[in-house]
């Protein structure tokens, strides 16, 4: 006899274990069964069937009939389902009480924790290249209105940067601003030229400068990701900072637009990139 998986899953959603559901569905098909018959018909291991039947009896979903060989019968489905629903409601009520009690205990601790903050908890220091790439992707995804970038190699995003293109499309469609300033020298690289063209087609405004002070990303005048090259070790050693600080982001935004105003609008080698002020 085949038992419908959907019906078994529905019974399981009401709190029955899989074997319990299979046994109950078997018992409703006849007036009574012995344990051995149930095991065979429900395809439940013989060594497990007694525990399953006992569990159903305790739930008042099955009744037992003593005799030389005990037999078992299912209570009517209407009554069985009502009992399962009652048990589920009682379980939810218990969880609601536990949740309310926990909220009463945990909320004061959470509130106290807000009064004890690290004076520099708005700064995250990153040195691992993978972590830097992940944070760069995060700041792009978080941007809602404006994304400004000083683009200097080496780039942390993959060459195709599909996620970055999606961000540019999203911001451009919603009326946001995406601006990037690239180094003139970087555009000698064909991959970088292709990158600039693809991002320009997506809606990014691009300009070009002979020098940039550092790698920088500013999102919505509130989030900053920037590289801080080691002044002693040189360009090969750098620390990346993620900063969530609107005042600092606002100052860096002004610096970005100062460089933007003086940057060239045309790609080297006379390759024009769409731009608007």
Image (tube, grey):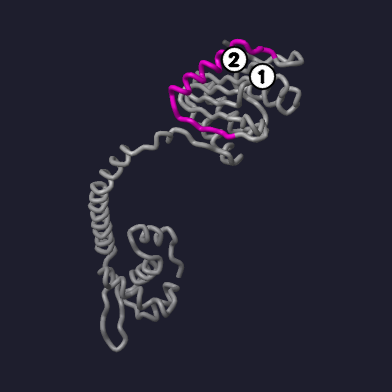
In this rendering, position of residue 28 left or right of residue 154: left
Q: Nearer the viewer, residue 94 or 111?
A: 111
Specify start and end residues of the magenta stretch as a single range. Answer: 239-266
* Rendering quarter of residue 192: top right
In this rendering, position of residue 20 left or right of residue 173: left
List x then y, in percent, for residue 102.
26, 50
Res 21 label: none
- Quarter of the image containing the N terminus? bottom left
List x then y, in percent, for residue 276.
59, 11
Q: Which residue is mark 2?
A: 259
Crowd rating for badge 2 (residues with CA inside 10 Å; few <14, some 14–19, many 20+): some
Q: Nearer the viewer, residue 11 or 247?
A: 247
Residue 61 to residue 118: above or below: below
Q: Residue at x 56, y 40 (%)?
A: 131
Q: Is residue 263 magenta?
A: yes
Label 2 residue SS: helix
Q: Which residue is mark 1?
A: 211
* Rendering quarter of residue 116: top left
- Work out whether mark 2 precedes mark 1 in sequence or the reverse, and give the earlier one: 1
């Amino acid at each position: 006899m085949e038992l419908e998986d959907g019906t078994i899953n529905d019974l399981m959603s009401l709190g029955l274990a899989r074997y319990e559901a299979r046994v109950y569905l078997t018992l409703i098909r006849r007036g009574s069964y012995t344990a051995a018959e149930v095991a065979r018909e429900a395809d439940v291991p013989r060594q497990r069937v007694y525990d399953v039947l006992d569990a159903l009896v305790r739930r008042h979903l099955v009744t037992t009939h003593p005799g030389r060989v005990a037999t078992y019968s299912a209570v009517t489905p209407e009554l069985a389902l009502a009992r399962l629903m009652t048990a589920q409601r009682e379980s939810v009520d218990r969880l609601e009480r536990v949740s309310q009690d926990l909220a009463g205990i945990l909320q004061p601790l959470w509130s106290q924790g807000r009064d004890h903050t690290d004076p520099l908890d708005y700064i995250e220091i990153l040195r691992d290249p993978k972590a830097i790439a992940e944070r760069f992707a995060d700041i792009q995804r978080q941007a809602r209105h404006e994304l400004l970038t000083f683009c200097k190699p080496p780039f942390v995003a993959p060459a195709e940067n599909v996620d970055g293109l999606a961000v540019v499309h999203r911001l451009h469609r919603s009326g946001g601003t995406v601006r990037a300033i690239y180094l003139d020298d970087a555009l000698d690289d064909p991959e970088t030229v292709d990158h600039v063209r693809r991002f320009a087609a997506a809606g990014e405004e691009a300009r070009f400068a002979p020098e940039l002070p550092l790698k920088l990303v500013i999102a919505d005048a509130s989030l900053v990701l920037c590289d801080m090259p080691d002044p002693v070790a040189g360009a090969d050693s750098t620390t990346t900072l993620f900063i969530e600080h609107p005042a600092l982001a606002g100052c860096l935004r002004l610096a970005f637009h100062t460089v933007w105003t003086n940057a060239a609008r045309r790609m080297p080698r006379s390759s024009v990139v769409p731009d608007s002020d």
